């Protein structure tokens, strides 16, 4: 496990199945999970772990460091952000860090 994962709390995980509708065009013969889907599924995991987060208002930063293939398990980690209103997260696969960033969520319920 990377230092990034070690410094955060695992909020949950997800897998994108090989038959997901976004994969045939991304990319034929070498499917990778699109970055927007990684963000969407990461937000779903974060909201499940903390239902009061509310809607995503802004992606303040996002960096994608390695491709995620269909069927890979992606673990989503939350990292301390001090007094900042943004939530820091990272995505890890068995092969290492796949994404990291800062998200701003709106008022929750």
Image: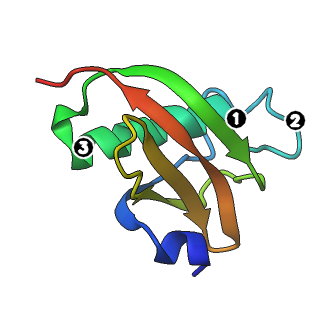
State left or right for residue 80 relative to residue 95.
left
Secondary element at tag 2: loop
Q: CA–CA distance between discs 3 and 1?
A: 21 Å
Answer with the quarter of the image where residue 23 lies.
top right
| Residue that appears at 62% across and 74% down | 94
Q: Earlier in the sequence, mark 2 or mark 3?
A: 2
Q: Residue 53 location, x and y as percent?
A: 25, 33
Q: Earlier in the sequence, mark 3 or mark 1?
A: 1
Identify the image's colour scheme: rainbow, by chain, secondary structure or one colour: rainbow
| Up-down relation of residue 46 to residue 90 (above or below) | above
The residue pinned by badge 1 equals 34
Q: Which mark is residue 28?
A: 2
Q: Earlier in the sequence, mark 1 or mark 2?
A: 2
Callout in the foreground (1, 2): 1
In this view of the protein, which residue sits in the foreground, 63 or 86? 86
State left or right for residue 12 relative to residue 25.
left
| Up-down relation of residue 82 to residue 75 (above or below) | above
State left or right for residue 95 relative to residue 89.
right
| Up-down relation of residue 58 to residue 8 (above or below) | above
Q: CA–CA distance between discs 2 and 3?
A: 32 Å
Secondary element at tag 3: helix
Callout in the foreground (3, 1): 3
Q: Residue 87 location, x and y as percent?
A: 41, 42
The residue pinned by badge 3 equals 48
| Residue that appears at 42% across and 29% down | 104
Q: Residue 26 location, x and y as percent?
A: 79, 32
Other residues around mark 1 within 10 Å, as few (<14) / some (14–19) / many (≥20): some
Q: Residue 82 location, x and y as percent?
A: 37, 52
The reply to whether callout 1 and callout 2 are in contact (CB within 8 Å) is: no
Callout in the foreground (2, 3): 3
In this view of the protein, which residue sits in the foreground, 56 or 67? 56
Q: Which mark is residue 79?
A: none
């Amino acid at each position: 496990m990377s230092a990034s994962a070690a410094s955060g709390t695992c909020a949950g995980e997800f897998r994108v199945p090989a038959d997901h509708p976004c994969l045939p065009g991304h990319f034929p013969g070498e499917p990778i999970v699109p970055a927007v889907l990684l963000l969407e599924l990461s937000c779903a995991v974060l909201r499940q772990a903390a239902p009061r987060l509310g809607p995503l208002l802004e992606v303040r930063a996002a960096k994608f460091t390695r491709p995620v293939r269909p069927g890979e398990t992606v673990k989503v980690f939350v990292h301390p952000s001090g007094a900042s209103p943004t939530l820091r997260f990272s995505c890890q696969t068995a092969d290492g860090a796949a994404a990291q960033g800062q998200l701003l969520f709106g008022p929750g319920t």
